[in-house]
Structure formats: C-alpha cells, structure tokens
Image (tube, rainbow, N blue to C red):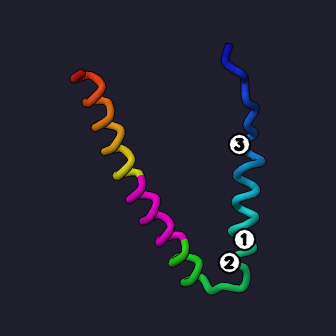
Amino acid sequence: MARKTEFHAVEFFRGIRDQQAALLKGRSNAEVIAFFSTFGKKAHGLTKRSAGRAKSAVRRSTQA
C-alpha cells in the first residue's frame, strides 16, 4: 500500500522566499531583476530538456 507523505507547500515556499530575501538583501532593483531573470531562463531550459527525455522514454517503452 502506498504511504501518504505530508507536504506543506506554504511553509516550503515561505522558506524559499526567506532564503532569497536574505541572498538579495541590500541589492539594487536591477540586481534583483537580473537574479530572477537568470533563474527563469535556467528553469525554462531545464523544462525543455526534461520534457524531451520523457517523451523518448515513453516512445521506447511502447515500441518494445
């Protein structure tokens, strides 16, 4: 039987927000914008690559 795992999303994202706030404390608006834009570009790139791999794996398993 599958075990239920508790995940508290609000607490998780508050922790991330607090870490980012500490990292960006004292930075200019331009530096903050640059930080999040770079992060967004990296995240977008990871999404594209992982989606391509998942499709390949599905195709291989259905062809066998």
Q: Mark 3, residues whose alpha carbon is within 10 Å: few (<14), some, or many (≥20)?
A: few
Do the residues under discs 1 and 2 have CB atoms within 8 angstroms? yes
Considering every residue shown, the one lying at the far top of the view is: 1
Amino acid type for the residue under numbered disc 1 = Ala
Compared across the picture, whether 51 is left or right of 64 comes to: right
Question: What amino acid type is highlighted by mark number 2?
Answer: Leu
Tell me the CA gap for discs 2 and 3.
Answer: 22 Å
Marks 1/3 in contact by CB < 8 Å: the verdict is no
Q: Residue at x 33, y 43 (%)?
A: 53
Residue sitting at 70 percent across and 52 percent down? Answer: 13
Return the residue nearer the eye: 35 or 57: 57
The span shown in magenta is 36-46
Question: What residue does disc 2 label?
Answer: 24
9 left or right of 47 in image: right
Looking at the rendered structure, the kind of residue marked 3 is Ala
Q: Where residue 1 sits: x, y (%)?
A: 68, 13
Residue 6, horizontal then vertical, whole percent: 76, 32
Question: Where, quadrant-wise, is the C terminus in this rendering?
Answer: top left
- Measuring 72% from the left and 85% from the top, which residue is drawn there? 26
Overall secondary structure of the magenta section: helix
- Residue 45 position, x and y percent, is 38, 59
9 sits to left or right of 55: right
Q: Which mark is residue 21?
A: 1
Of labels 1 and 3, earlier in sequence is 3
Q: Are marks 2 and 3 in contact (CB under 8 Å)?
A: no
Which residue in the structure is indicated by mark 3? 9
